Image (tube, grey):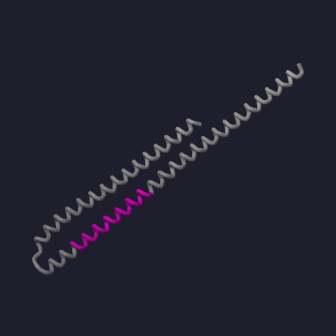
Amino acid sequence: MQAQLVDLYRAGIRSAADMMKLSLEQTERFQQQQLQLIRKALDESTRSTAQAGEVKGLDDMVAFNSRLAGAQLERVGEFWANWWRAAGDAQKSMIEQFQSNMGQANEKMREGYSFAARAAEDTTRLASQASQAANERKEHRKSA
């Protein structure tokens, strides 16, 4: 029974470590996405600065501002889409890991229950045999 508890403890520690690893991997992935967005924003900023220097009239300025506003809006939308996608992926991974861990724990509990049931049956059988042996000895003494 003690071995079963140790196995259950190990499974719990392994579960916690797996969940932590999964969480850290998701965080790393999300930060990589953010870095890509920042690099893209820096490139667009450099390009926009160069384009701003080429503005010659009011029509060019209005067109430039429209393109700049559109690009900024696209970046904001992309940021939030990536953020929500990363959050959804993280939640999905955590749920899958949790379900896997619960399945393993459930199996360990079944094994522990089976072990306890067998031990109880064995103890009952041994007690019954010991009782029968004691009764036979009493009978043997009475007859002698």
Residue 26 at what x, y percent from top left? Answer: 37, 53
Q: In this view, does 78 lie above or below 134?
A: below
Q: How many tags in the picture?
A: 0
- Tell whether 86 sits left or right of 1: left
The quarter of the picture where the N terminus appears is top right
Residue that appears at 12% across and 74% down: 55
Q: In this view, does 98 lie above or below 123?
A: below
Query: Is 139 in the magenta?
Result: no
Q: Quadrant of residue 65?
A: bottom left
Residue that appears at 78% across and 30% down: 131
Q: In which quarter of the image is residue 89?
A: bottom left
- Tell whether 78 sits left or right of 105: left
Pick out the residue farthest to the bottom.
58
Magenta residues, dominant SS class: helix
Nearest to the observer: residue 80 or residue 47: 80
Q: In this view, does 64 lie above or below 91?
A: below
Q: In which quarter of the image is residue 91?
A: bottom left
Residue that appears at 10% across and 76% down: 56
Range of residues picked out in magenta: 68-91
Residue 99 at what x, y percent from top left? Answer: 51, 52
- Tell whether 76 sits left or right of 131: left
Residue 127 at what x, y percent from top left? Answer: 74, 32
Nearest to the observer: residue 19 or residue 5: 5
Residue that appears at 63% across and 42% down: 113
The quarter of the picture where the C terminus appears is top right
Pick out the residue farthest to the right.
143
Nearest to the observer: residue 24 or residue 57: 24
